[in-house]
Image (cartoon, rainbow, N blue to C red):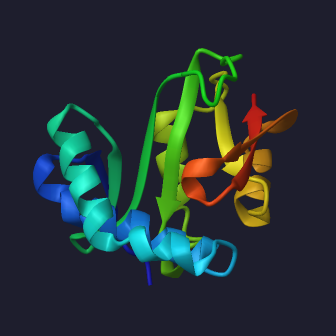
Amino acid sequence: MFRVVNLRTATLSDAAAVARVHHTTWVTTYGQILPPEFWATATLERRTSTWERWLANGATPLVAEVDGEVVGIAMSGDAVEQDDVLPIRGRQLYLLYVLAAHHGSGIGQALLDAVVPPGTGAQLWVAEDNPRARRFYERNGFVTEGTRIVDASTADLAEVRMVR
């Protein structure tokens, strides 16, 4: 059955829904990779208050809705230094998450194309141990360029930089 996907900029009133997508996708993707100690503090409540703060301070993620429910989020902007690694592109994809039930539906592609239009030079950081995401980005012209960081704030999750 075809479902209409609505893409729009999130507002402060979307904080709980955006946090739910962000948290749920992290649990689904990294639940077995990150240690239990990480999940003791990486709660939905904490993610919700973080998104409330970010949205109140001007963050403008794009949300994807299906039947009025937020099922995906994406955000890009000016590239920034991360863990003392200088950016090598002007634009950066900061996040792109779609609930597992909507994988393969085209929602992730629509979000990526909306926040980093096809052909736009950009960079992103992706978990080294996330082959599904890495394949998705490769299909969109991104390549792993060799820089790797270990993020102490996420239980030493290794990330690699991809560029196009």
Residue 135 lies in quadrant: bottom right
Q: Residue furthest front?
A: 37
Q: Viewer-proximal residue, 138 or 7?
A: 138
Q: Viewer-proximal residue, 109 or 161?
A: 161
Q: Residue furthest left?
A: 13
How many numbered discs sit on the rendered protein?
A: 0
Residue 117 lies in quadrant: top right
Residue 85: % across, % down: 70, 23
Residue 19: % across, % down: 31, 63
Q: Is residue 164 positioned above or below 105 on the image? A: above
Q: Residue at x 33, y 53 (%)?
A: 63
Q: Residue at x 75, y 28 (%)?
A: 164
Residue 59 lies in quadrant: top left
Q: Is residue 75 positioned above or below 15 on the image? A: above
Residue 91: % across, % down: 56, 22
Q: Residue furthest right?
A: 146
Q: Is residue 37 left or right of residue 73?
A: right
Q: Residue at x 32, y 61 (%)?
A: 47
Q: Is residue 83 left or right of residue 138?
A: left
Residue 22: % across, % down: 41, 63
**The N terminus lies in quadrant:** bottom left
**Residue 47 visible to an observer of this rendering:** yes
Q: Is residue 97 positioned above or below 59 on the image? A: below
Q: Viewer-proximal residue, 82 or 72?
A: 82
Q: Residue at x 59, y 15 (%)?
A: 90
**Residue 99 visible to an observer of this rendering:** no
